Amino acid sequence: MKRIAIVLLVALLIAALPIAALAEADKPFAGTEIKVYNWEDYIDREVLNIFEEETGCHVNYVTFSQNEDMYTKLSTGAESYDVVIPSEYMIQRLIKEDLVEELDLANIPNLENVLDNLRDPIYDPGNAHSVPYMWGTLGIVYNTDMVSEPVTSWTAMLEKQNGKIFMMDSMRDTVAIGLIMNGYSLNSDNADELEAAREWLLNQKDSNVVDGYILDQAKDMMAGNEAAMAVMYSGDALYAMEKNESLAYVIPDEGSNVWVDGMCIPKTTQNKAAAECFINFMCRPDIAQMNMDYIYYSSPIKQVVENLSEEELASTAMNPTDDMLARCAYYVDISSFENANLYDDIWMDVLM
Amino acid sequence: MKRSWYATPYALWMLLFAVVPLLFVCWYAFTTPEGAFTLSNFQEFAKPRYIGVVLRSLKLALYCTILCLVIGYPTAWFLAGRGFNHAQSLVVLILLPMWMNLLLRTYAMMTLLDDNGVLNAALEALGLGKVHVIGTEGAVLMGLVYNYLPFMVLPIYTVLKKMDYSVIEAAEDLGCNPVRVMTRVVIPMSVPGIVSGVTMVFMPAVTSFAISTLLSNGKLRLAGDLIDYIFNQSSSPNRWNIGSSFSLLMLVLILISIGFLRKVDPDNEGGGMW
């Protein structure tokens, strides 16, 4: 009996060998590679390993810190990427300039998982070119120990506080605040309105209230009690708040920006099928959950939203109310605006 | 084979990665995005904000050079001294920070100078109270000096080391006091080293970037940051043209400064760098 068992076992093993080998070869994209170009600090790297494990496709992962940087790299065409994850206004521009492929949605069935209100967006009708990855808002993070009043308005950024105040090293987000404070749309193409925004921002700069224009350092500075107030994206705000209980996040009453970062496939892609497989993979609930838990931004995946805890549901940064969202707007692509150069000009005046 | 042929790899390298790119820069600087000749790219820089950035860069580079000289010369003099046996190991120590990437060094500097950083913790422990450095011009200056000091010490050290000590002894025998030995003999003889050091500090300092942005929290940007911004982030369709013209202007500025220094050291004895 024992011998039979051993023989059977050996036979099974021998039979299993080619099956295992087959399984390896069965991985749909074995031996291929995709290059993913994403924001800094914007993924749980573990999911890349899982993707490689499941598909056999190697992920070459590179990062950028601003949409504009990403655009420069992409538009010169010097390097080829397979998946890029820019914001909505940049997606609009990439579509307009024919730099991204039309997606074969049949390869991305998990698009079904995306929240209805983020499907078929105005910047990309029918999700023909992009699938939402994360979304969020722009607001102010403040330290309740250093700032007395609860902050409700952008004007708080004009007053000296008991600590440092940081604006953002980002053209669109900074000019937007100048426009909003003058009561104008954050997508203005009117020279007078933009001049008013310039004046507001330069006033703020010259009054020496602002301690700097920074991006990724802000969350650590807020978390480490090194600053009183900073303009920040909602996910970075949550990250800082997780580490420091005295912090609060507000979407100011005057209004702000709501944004969506979407996954697109540039025209330079060498491996479109694998890229679509990657986008589909990123929309899988378990993967989206991993990413959200890691980077603290709001996932657009239904199953993840249904799983939010009480605390997360109550958080302005994770789950803004409809009221708050009603006063926020998407950015639109300004590259074809008559006064597009003014945005640049204002920003240079602020920076230099 | 003629001896000059041995330099062929270097010549090819320079041709490919210095001369050809420079020609590209010149081409872009004098053309529109469509390729037509124009001088309008240069007009852009008559704007006050650009002049302000250039003046700030020149000012900080000048301060940096002076500080490096004031700190570096005595150091080099000490190292080159006859009675000092550990010069070699100390020179290695001076070079040590340069084994690390410039950006890493600057990030370390941020942590050191931060309001709640190492420097302030030390000052507090000594009961001296805090100083606010990060985000100021002083922080940028400290970053520049820290990064470029070795370039000042080394050429001066080399010249002083080669100096004939009997000259100093002769000066002493003939009645010079130590101060006059320094001002009348040592310093004049080390001018080539000073010129070389000043050039090697001033040039990279005036075009430096990233150091200024990081240490000033993005408030004080220098010419290098401006060029970086124009090329990488500007949404202007002729950003390459404007960026190139500005690069060219900076190049001319540097050439002029070197021209001045050449007048001081016409024989180019400072290690033959330029």
Image (cartoon, coloured by chain):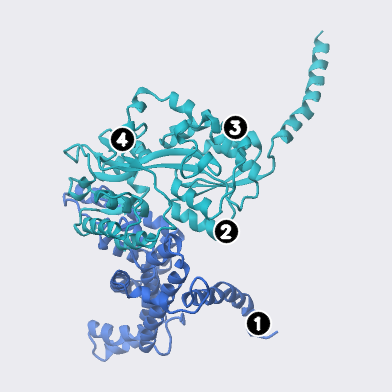
- Report which residue position mark 2 lands on: A77
Quadrant of the rendered structure where residue A52 is? top right
Q: What whole-number distance in Å separates the C-alpha atoms at marks 4 and 3?
A: 31 Å
Q: Chain of mark 4?
A: A
State the image coordinates of residue B91 (x, y, percent, origin top left): 41, 67
C-alpha gap between disc 2 and disc 1: 38 Å
Q: Which residue is mark 1?
A: B5
> Which label belongs to residue A341?
none
Q: Earlier in the sequence, mark 2 or mark 3?
A: 2
Residue occupying the point 31% across, 64% down: A352
Say the numbered circle drawn on residue A324. Answer: 4
In the rendered image, what is the letter of the chain coloured blue? B
The residue mark sitting in front, 2 or 1, is 2
Chain letter of disc 2 in the image: A
Report, in whole angstroms, how far the alpha carbon at label 2 lies from the one at label 3: 30 Å
Q: How many marks?
A: 4
Looking at numbered disc 3 in the image, what kind of residue is underneath it? Pro
| Tag 1 secondary structure | helix
Q: Which amino acid type is marked by label 4?
A: Met
Chain letter, colour cyan in render: A
Task: Please report whichever mark, 4 or 3, sits nearer to the chain's N-terminal start.
Answer: 3
Task: Say which residue label 3 marks.
Answer: A109
Q: Nearer the viewer, mark 2 or mark 4?
A: 4
Which residue appears farthest toward the bottom when viewing the image?
B174
